[in-house]
Amino acid sequence: MVPRRQEYGLKKTAGMRSGSVVNFRAAVNSGSVRRSSAVLPSVLTFLVIVASGGLLLMIEKGMLNSMETPSPRGSGRRLDVRGQAGKYGRDRLDVDVDSQILHEIRNRTIRTVCGQKNMPHSVWSLSPLQRKTLLQHILVNDQYRFLYCYIPKVACSNWKRVLKVLSGALESVDVSVKMNHHNDLLFLSSLKPEEIRYRLKHYFKFMFVREPAERLLSAYRNKFGEIQSYQKKYGVEIVKRYRKGLSKDASVAGDDVTFAEFVRYLLDEDAERMNEHWMPMYNLCQPCAVNYDFIGSHEHLENDAEFVLQRVGAPPHVHFPERQTWYKPVTTETLHYYLCSLPQKLLRELLPKYILDFSLFAYPLPNTTTEHCRH
């Protein structure tokens, strides 16, 4: 039997520019909404964040050459890019400056949202399920004293390669070997409470994020287009659940799940019990409960990874791996195609479920207006 859909509604707000983002309507009354354990920020707070982010971009674009951006809620140092145009070239310097702008917007957003009283402020204030998920996604390196919260579909396999090289379990990040995601890795969940507290307080903590819709599409294309185990475990269930007349069909292979069917499945799932590949990034790494010293992004992966390796004191020969030749990036055009192909109702219901990923990490909501999709 299909579980009842978890409905999230954001009221349509006056002042929001028409045509800029999808407008959300309250689809159900308060009595029929099942409260999510991951508390959503208020509509007003979210709009202030979005507006202030745009203002920061305009104001600070000319200021960042003369100021240093603090790292997220911590004391991590930023790479000094001022005056290095000759070393890196103009394009590289522009990328670094843009990255610093993004980090500053993200830092302020996190401080604003996580400062609310109803948000978790420590690992120990999380529910047992939330804490279990978080601790199972934080990797530990005691030699270089850092914690890395990994998020699937955000270059986590390559970061795990780096950790294995730093621990001596792997000779080089370039060694051609299938990645084992558990062997030779130390997870925070395997340590005692006092050991966890010490490392959370004293170690450098970082995570990497990605545009939420792009991450979902990457998971969909990879898991349902290439991985047979996911097709059998999830694909079969999705097809039988959402495709008429196939609920009892034993011949369903699960290898032809449509993106719309995948989205419908996400809407019916509890965010805290999702598979890690499409669980919201907020739920995986709990950035309000953990004071991350640095939050890098998939969009600035090379520079942000370089900063982290320098910051933790990794040996010069250890570098972040280049993307594999088989890697299929999600292009802007591809994302536009898939999102615009979705029924508007599904998208209006999907985005609020990942609203903390969009708002906390300073990603604009995708534009899927009729006029925009027409092009």
Image (cartoon, helix red, strand yellow):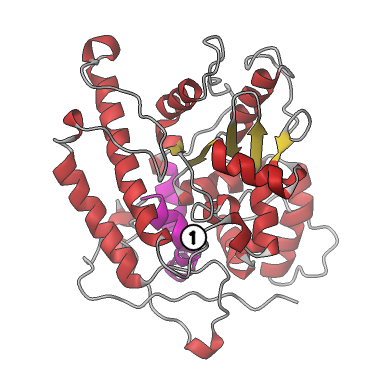
Residue 38 falls in image quadrant = bottom right
- The residue located at (70%, 47%) in the rendering is 194
- The residue located at (16%, 45%) in the rendering is 58
Q: Is residue 166 visible?
A: yes
Q: Is residue 275 visible?
A: no
Indicate whether residue 128 is drawn in magenta: no
Residue occupied by mark 1: 354
Residue 348 versus residue 168 in the image, above or below:
below
**Label 1: element kind:** loop
90 to the left or right of 260 = left
Q: Position of residue 12 (x, y in %)?
A: 31, 76
Towards the viewer: 130 or 178? 130
For the stretch drawn in magenta, the main secondary structure is helix
39 to the left or right of 219 = left
Q: Quadrant of the N terminus?
A: bottom right
Residue 297 versus residue 109 in the image, above or below:
above
Count of labels in the image: 1
Towards the viewer: 161 or 289? 289
Residue 70 versus residue 15 in the image, above or below:
above
Indicate whether residue 344 is drawn in magenta: yes
Q: Amino acid at mark 1?
A: Tyr
70 to the left or right of 342 = left
How packed mark 1 is, by other alpha carbons closer than 10 Å (few <14, some 14-19, many 20 or more), is some
183 to the left or right of 134 = right
Q: Position of residue 260 (x, y in %)?
A: 55, 61
Q: Position of residue 56 (x, y in %)?
A: 21, 48
Towards the viewer: 323 or 321? 321
Residue stretch rendered in magenta on the structure? 334-362
